[in-house]
Amino acid sequence: MDHARIGIGGHAYGAFTALLVAGMNGTLSDARVRAAVVMSPPGPSTMRGITPQSFATLKVPVMFMTGTNDRGASESEDVSWRKQAFENSPSGDKYFVLIDGARSSSFTGQVSFYDVPIQPATTTNPYYGQQQVPQQQRGAMVFGNDRRIFQMVKIASLAFWDAYLKSDTTARDLLSTPKFESSFSGAHLTAK
């Protein structure tokens, strides 16, 4: 292990922890951390003690990743809420990656049926002729799409780590908006 090149990453509550260690709020930061990748990051939240100003102390390079279907515990915890972590962080080596169709579980390589989009299946009660509660239908397309998304997550995060922990110029070049977006269909990058 190279103690001079330490990065931290996390997903959901792990992203919250990674942000704290990377410098959010400044109270739990670890000066050894040189970069962070946070997937499904939290936005401002009174429950978590996060204000818009909490992100102002993030001085290290950070890649924030989320998806268009990445929802949190409440209705307000959507993509725009997650993006506030990026928007409220200071400029300089900050990246926001938005992946079309990605859900919270897309970043883990697992498929969770709880966050798979539901397509109603109309059924009729044979006794009363009324529609029953819609059933959930899931197809192989969800699994294939998640594999594609997870590949993007792995490649983008590895490029970020290589750029900031190994000073790899090829990896840094991939993090330029036009090159990144042409390399990943369905992924959008904002840098500041």
Image (cartoon, rainbow, N blue to C red):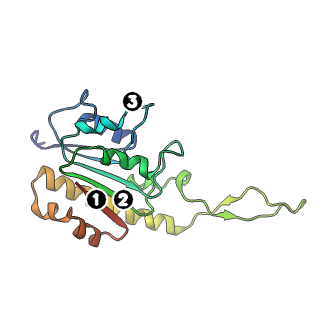
Three-letter code, disc 2: Leu
Residue 113 x %, y %: 55, 54
Residue 188 x %, y %: 33, 63
Three-letter code, disc 3: Gly
Figure check: 2 above or below 179: above
* Residue at (39, 42) in percent of width and height: 43
For the residue carrying disc 1, how many other residues have a C-alpha within 10 Å: few (<14), some (14-19), or many (20+)?
some
- Residue at image mark 2: 98
- Whichever of labels 2 and 3 marks the residue nearer the N terminus, that label is 3
* Residue at (77, 64) in percent of width and height: 123
Q: State yes or no: discs 2 and 1 in contact (Cβ < 8 Å).
A: yes
Three-letter code, disc 1: Thr
**Under tag 1, what secondary structure?**
strand
* Residue at (23, 44) in percent of width and height: 90
Number of marks in picture? 3
- Give the farthest residue toward the right: 127
- Residue at image mark 3: 49
**Under tag 2, what secondary structure?**
strand
The quarter of the rendered structure image containing the N terminus is top left
Left or right, residue 6 beside residue 10? left
- Residue at image mark 1: 190
**Under tag 3, what secondary structure?**
loop
Spatial distance from mark 2 to mark 1, Cα to Cα? 8 Å
